[in-house]
Amino acid sequence: MSEWRTTTVGEVGEIFDGPHATPTRIDEGPYFLNIASLNQGRLNLTLSDHVSEPDFARWTKRVTPQKDDLLFSYETRLGEAALMPADVRACLGRRMALIRPKPETIHPQFFLYLYLGRAFQKTIELNTIHGATVNRIPLNRMSQWELQIPSLPEQKAIAEVLGALDDKIAANTRLAGTADDAASALLLSSLSSEWVRLDEIATIVMGSSPKGDTLNESGDGVPFYQGVRDFGMRSPSRRVFTTSPVRMASKDDVLVSVRAPVGDVNRANEVLCIGRGIAAVRSIRGAKSTLFHQLKAERGAWEPFEAEGTVFGSINRAQLHGIRLRSVRDEAADAVETELHNTEALISSLLSENLSLAATRDALLPKLMSGALRVKDAETIVEKAGA
């Protein structure tokens, strides 16, 4: 294994930030990169806004993000980062900055994994300025931060090993998305012209939050969800737990957000506790997958409860009970539920594999980044993981 050497952020890349303001956001045009778009090493452009061409010109006077720039948040959501993809016109949003890697010194993909690794995350924590409202990274001192890197060939090898896992995760996610689109199309093609109230086809449990002193992030008790923060493509990710649950959702219940964003849905993949921002909806007829897709499809049903002005959107118990959904044609109901159930099983399998792959990646990351694990040994582990 090659020698690792000490260097600084400033020696491996150049730091830029964007204007400290927010332009008018529109529905199309160049992307205005939001910190919400940074998610576990990947850039989700669907969560970014758009700007006009004149605003794009003003917001890129200092820097225009280009392929392989390392994008990161320097205020709130500290520690999140992603690489800028090719052929995307975008400007930096508020609280966003980038490091332009020097290719003769550092491999961009390796740099991303180094940034997300335990050692550099600790460096971020040690240098964080804790403000009255938000925490931030002092960009004027970031170039002096030290880091450890191996030779370029070793960097490339490490990036390829970890990248194989991320590529498999991305492929699974795309396949799950395709399956989801097919399921949505099937549901829409099976709907009748008749409408039904939600409480005619489902039982509804409104959430209630347990006392704050029963909450923890150490895994004690049952998973607890207050709102959509931890929602995923299908099921929420465990983060907060409670030792004194109040209202519960059963496995396969549809979790519906009753506070902004009203109407967002997930499925409970286990028994869990729901807070005030969530309702658990359970099919009376056993059509669990059909009900999920009915609620997912009827975005128009939630529009009257969206936010107006400075008021946050919400829906109360009576309003939720009265939500009207288009019903599935009687003659197609059983076949539709069977097909949707099978599709949901495929999606669940793909997302479950992603969790396993991500766990393998996260276990390898600190060992590779510290030089404690040889690349060849890591390659064997990755092959066994199926990537």
Image (spheres, rainbow, N blue to C red):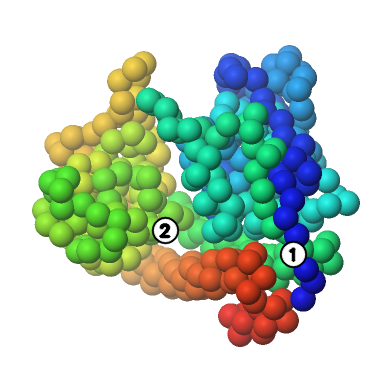
Under mark 2, the amino acid is Arg
Instruction: State the SS at label 2.
Output: loop
Q: Position of residue 165 (x, y in %)?
A: 63, 69
Q: Position of residue 359 (x, y in %)?
A: 50, 70
Q: Position of residue 198 (x, y in %)?
A: 22, 47
Q: Choose top left, top right, bottom left or bottom right for residue 373.
A: bottom right
| Mark number, residue 197 | none
* Above or below: residue 223 compared with residue 21: below
Q: Residue furthest right?
A: 104
**Along the line of sight, the residue nearer the viewer: 341 or 86:** 86
**Along the line of sight, the residue nearer the viewer: 375 or 195:** 375
Number of other residues with Cα within 10 Å of mark 1, as a class: few under 14, some 14 to 19, many 20 or more: some
Under mark 1, the amino acid is Trp
Which residue is depicted at the point 32% across and 65% down? Answer: 269
Q: Compute the Cα span from label 1 to label 2.
A: 41 Å
- Quadrant of the frame with the N terminus: bottom right
- Residue at mark 1: 4
- Residue at mark 2: 234
N-term-proximal mark, 1 vs 2: 1
Which residue is depicted at the point 12% across and 57% down? Answer: 244
**Along the line of sight, the residue nearer the viewer: 161 or 180:** 161
